[in-house]
Image (cartoon, rainbow, N blue to C red):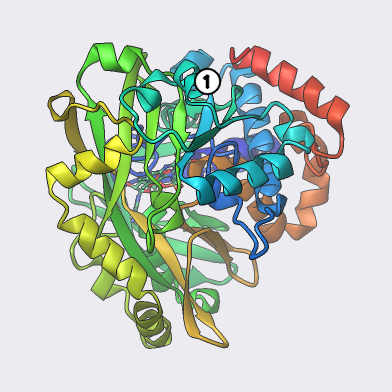
Amino acid sequence: MSATLGTLLQQIEPGWSIGLFENLEAAGLESSGPWNNAGTGHSALCELNYAPASPDGTVDPKKSLGINEQFQLTRQFFAWSVNQGLVKDPKSFIHPLPHMSFVQGEAHQRYLKARYESLSAHTLFDTMEYTEDLDQIAEWTPLVAEGRTQRTVAASRVVGGTDVDFGSLSKQLVDGLAARGADVRFGHRVTNLVKTGSGWRLTVKNHASGETFEVDAKFVFVGAGGGALPLLQKSGIDEIKGFGGFPISGVFLRSTNDEVIARHEAKVYGQAAVGAPPMSVPHLDTRYVDGKKALMFGPYGGFSPKFLKTGKLWDLPGSVRPGNLLPMLNVAKDNLDLVKYLLTELTATNSKRMNAMREYYPAANPDDWEMITAGQRVQVIKKDPKKGGVLQFGTEVIASADGSISGLLGASPGASTATPIMLGLLKRCFPNQYSAWEGKLKEIVPTLGTSLDSNADLYHEVKASTDQVLKLA
Ligand SMILES: Cc1cc2nc3c(=O)[nH]c(=O)nc-3n(C[C@H](O)[C@H](O)[C@H](O)COP(=O)(O)OP(=O)(O)OC[C@H]3O[C@@H](n4cnc5c(N)ncnc54)[C@H](O)[C@@H]3O)c2cc1C
């Protein structure tokens, strides 16, 4: 998020001085690190939680369309970054990969068909395919069909999906920031923020020297991922009052068998278990990390009170304030299914985990898999006039009324939407400058402000050109 915002700011205001302080020893090692997230270029091609069924069984395409439109902006930013030489080779961070949804049983079959009928009528999903034929599924993705006895199945597929190594992208963008004059400091932790007139004074600790120093800034973006909530709380701005965070941890299983890895070439998403947070839907995913093809399954949910993978056990209790206590208590009371789901996941044995994987890959062999810890997601808890407090699975941009400080809470759809989220943040925090920036921003993201779903010719033209630059065609 910070790498994207910094890159945009350097283009639209080359005269501004930018400082970036990162607690860890390099960029992109927390949630954006390739093994801390699933690397899905989220565009609602395969994620069923972005297309909920209505009580009458129909599927409203609105949410899926919105997410897909957002990813189109991200793709354009990616292509611009490659054209600018900020990212050396697109293969270092993005790969074409079919996105599939797979379900079992008649009810899920009906749902998937309704989703296909709803989405495939739209330009952005016009290449979506659907089948209830296991032999066809075997052709699309052999591991999912192999050894399967249940034949009441259905799958949909969009060949033009992507796998993204957000860690590699973040590192390259941050290198670009430094090369173009930003003061980038790793191993530096922001420990406090105090308002000073129209700007902010940050206290920063240098881990190597143990020294603490202060920095003044007219504008601050708290791009600290899971660490954003505590820092925004320290700022004391009214807009953060009433917000809390609910951390969800996770693990992935990663294949150690090259033959198995070679036989799968897709991201295959299914339905969430009862009580599971929507983004914890397990999926069987091809990944491309450090130039090597890989295969993973997960995430399995879990609970840890840390707000960052490298965080502290005190993070959650330390975030409780008089203003967010009630919302947090209400969320605990109203989300017993989630609590039960997390407890079940936490106590799951390896054989239970393998059984969960066999829903997607019936012939999976436990000897072929190792467990890795995924990143932390801090879900947003916010005040709600009716319920007292609600748990939200999306992202929330927090900005002070004067626009001098902002930050991002939440983690879904996540890194895939960094470009539209940061563009929205610029508009919100710099309302007086934004219209003057629009021309330059459109050089970066040419279809900014245009619905591509309503402009089929433009969509196909832009998609073809970004595919070519990103070597996705
Ligand atoms: C299990 C899992 C799966 C996911 N899958 C996907 C996916 O498939 N597709 C997708 O698009 N998104 C996915 N996401 C979400 C995505 O990973 C995040 O939305 C995205 O990486 C967040 O980027 P960020 O820059 O906000 O945070 P981060 O990448 O976490 O960066 C924040 C940085 O701030 C630093 N920091 C924190 N506190 C301080 C401080 N006080 N001082 C200095 N530095 C600090 C941290 O060290 C870190 O480097 C997933 C997330 C998880 C956890």
x, y (%) of residue 1?
50, 44
- On the question of residue 305 being in view, the answer is no
Asked which quadrant contains residue 10, the reply is: top right
- Work out whether 312 lies above or below 444: below
Q: Residues within 10 Å of mark 1 (few under 14, many from 20)?
A: some
- Is residue 81 shown left or right of residue 322? right
- Is residue 441 shown left or right of residue 104? right
Q: Residue at x 67, y 12 (%)?
A: 468
Q: Quadrant of the C terminus?
A: top right
x, y (%) of residue 387?
51, 86
Q: Residue at x 53, y 26 (%)?
A: 133
- Is residue 458 shown left or right of residue 283? right
Q: Residue at x 82, y 37 (%)?
A: 439
How many numbered marks, from 0 up? 1
Q: Is mark 1 within 8 Å of ligand 1?
A: no
Asked which quadrant contains residue 344, the reply is: bottom left
Between 268 and 371, the one nearer to me in the picture: 268
Between 71 and 188, the one nearer to me in the picture: 71
Residue assigned mark 1: 136
Question: Could you tell me the amino acid type at mark 1?
Answer: Gln
- On the question of residue 216 being in view, the answer is yes
Task: Describe the element under mark 1 as helix, strand or loop.
Answer: helix
x, y (%) of residue 62?
72, 52
- Work out whether 243 lies above or below 352: below
x, y (%) of residue 376?
31, 52
Asked which quadrant contains residue 203, the reply is: bottom left
Between 208 and 97, the one nearer to me in the picture: 97
Q: Residue at x 27, y 68 (%)?
A: 340
- Is residue 259 shown left or right of residue 8? left
